[in-house]
Amino acid sequence: MSYAAEARGNPGSTQAGRLAATSPLARYTAAAAASSAVVIRRYSTSFGLACRLLGPGIRPEIESVYALVRLADEVVDGAASGAGLPVNAVVNQLDILEGETYAALELGYSTNLVVHAFAQTARRAGIGRDLIAPFYGSMRRDCDPRAHSGASLGEYIYGSAEVVGLMCLKVFLLDAHPSPAERTVMAESARRLGAAFQKVNFLRDLGQDSAELGREYFPGVNPRHLHERQKTALVAELRADLDAAVPGLRLLPDSSRRAVALAHAIFSELTDRINACPADVLSTTRISVPTATKARLAAAVVLGLGPLGHPRRAA
């Protein structure tokens, strides 16, 4: 028996009345959004904490973007191979997921809850194939054992991280009206912040990516024999990205600025800890930020402290 039928059978029930007033698609979409929230809680304490500072109107939208990104990432990062799939089957599963994503954009519906939630957000925010296709392209590149060149790494970071920042920015600006110049500054910041996040994760997972997944992202860098000079240069590069992201972050609407500021603060802290870690130790140790430190950073952001504390807001 459907919920609507149950509601008709007991019209005096307040809960039944609410169910009757809700369409099947709305209930399904709500369930899809809830499933995306579970994904971010299970896979990322840092982004999960930052999401708590988002305005309630956009939090489910950002969670839906993250959930799809995480779902695709898990296809190529071990879940599929852990189930016994060979590389060609892993790529096939990724192709299927990409096809489901495009179909859901057209139909406004998917049998895959995570894809459905993402498609609802993408249709509202104007996220299209121009951002989605590069993302899947980078995920597919993770199944290619060839070492990266400087050019291919730049293309990979754009697809795996920068476009995700641009997707989130489209959500952040749903009800905002920035000038074209402000929008350009924010887009550049979104890309640079996404790139910084990705580079931090490369350095955090240096040894694991090489030993378990056979990946070496930085050209000319042997993850098993990272030199201090190489680490210093990589840290300087990602710090430049973090610094370049600040002007656009200051322009974000109230509903998203604090959340992004917290993510920026956490990854800045990670960068400092990576810099303080000897290069030979970094190759075998995953750097993290203690929960107490994250709480302190969150409190500072809420109080308006730090480089993003007093922004010039977008119109």
Image (cartoon, helix red, strand yellow):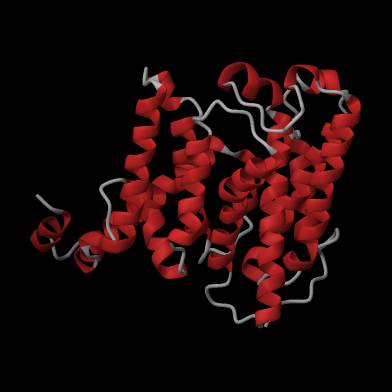
Q: Residue at x 58, y 67 (%)?
A: 172
Of the pair 55 and 6, the residue shown nearer to us? 55
Whether residue 216 can be seen here: yes
280 w.r.t. 125: above or below: above
**Image quarter of residue 16:** bottom left
Q: Where is residue 223 in the image (x, y as percent from the top left)?
A: 74, 22
Q: Residue 165's image quarter? A: bottom right
Quadrant in the rendering for residue 277:
top right
| Residue at left offset 69%, top offset 68% | 186
Residue 48 in view, yes or no: no
Quadrant where the image shows the C terminus: bottom right
Q: In this view, does 305 lie to the left or right of 161?
A: right
Q: Nearer the viewer, residue 24 or 128?
A: 128
Left or right of 121, for residue 263: right
**From the viewer's perspective, is 219 left or right of 160?**
right
Placement of 131 over or under 275, stated as above or below:
below
- On the image, the x and y values in percent for residue 43 come to 54, 36
The residue nearer to you, when weighing 81 against 13, is: 81
Residue 240 screen position, x and y as percent = 83, 51
As drawn, 189 above or below 176: above
The number of discs equals: 0
Q: Residue at x 31, y 48 (%)?
A: 100
The residue shown at (85%, 31%) is: 231
